[in-house]
Amino acid sequence: MIVDDEPDIRILARRQLEEAGYRTLEAKDGDEALALLLGGLRPDVVLLDLRMPRVDGMTVVKELSAHHLLEQIPVVIFSAHGCGGLLDELLCLGCRECITKPYIQEQLVSAVEAAAH
């Protein structure tokens, strides 16, 4: 699942991951992602932007870690601002990796592959 408020970023990530053989689903923000996840969707990996309107990525990560069935879903953060001072907290909450945008396709695919296994 690709979660980002920028449509161009979602489209690019989707194309890159599908080119690598992954099936994808998109959410336009954290609110939509949480609705899908709390509604029963169980993706292999959530690729998550941190800075989004309404419900940001940190809130999504905290919600996932608070639900027994959702805390097992691997999360890879991808953010234009990196993870900065949040990296330790994000890792403690179960995030697998933090990718800074812009990224190269191999970096994205490698992070998703590692998180999925």
Image: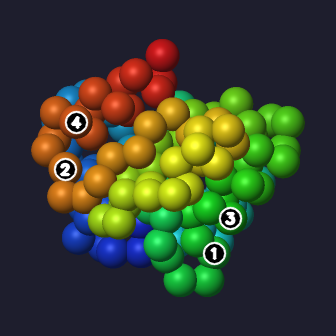
Residue contact between numbered discs 3 and 2, judged by CB atoms under 8 Å: no
Whether the residues at callouts 2 and 4 have beta carbons within 8 Å, the answer is yes
Work out which residue is located at the far top of the displayed protein and give it.
117
What residue do we see at 47% from left, 72% from top? 51
Q: Mark 4 points at which residue?
A: 107
What residue sits right under mark 1 in the picture? Answer: 55
Q: Residues within 10 Å of mark 2 (few under 14, many from 20)?
A: few
Q: Residue furthest bottom?
A: 53
Q: How far apart in space, not on screen, are marks 3 and 2 (Cα)? A: 23 Å
Residue shown at 57%/34% (left/top)? 74
Question: Of label 1 and label 2, which has the lower sequence position?
Answer: 1
Q: Which amino acid does label 4 sit on?
A: Gln
**Circle on res. 59:** 3
Instruction: Kindly identify which residue carries mark 2.
Output: 103
Tag 4's secondary structure? helix
Give the residue type that dot 2 points to.
Tyr
Report the label total: 4
**Residue 108, percent across and down?**
27, 39
Residue at far front of view: 85
Q: Which residue is drawn at 44% across and 37% down?
A: 97
Q: Give amino acid for label 3.
A: Thr
**Amino acid bearing label 1:** Val
From what the image shows, is residue 45 above or below residue 55? Answer: above
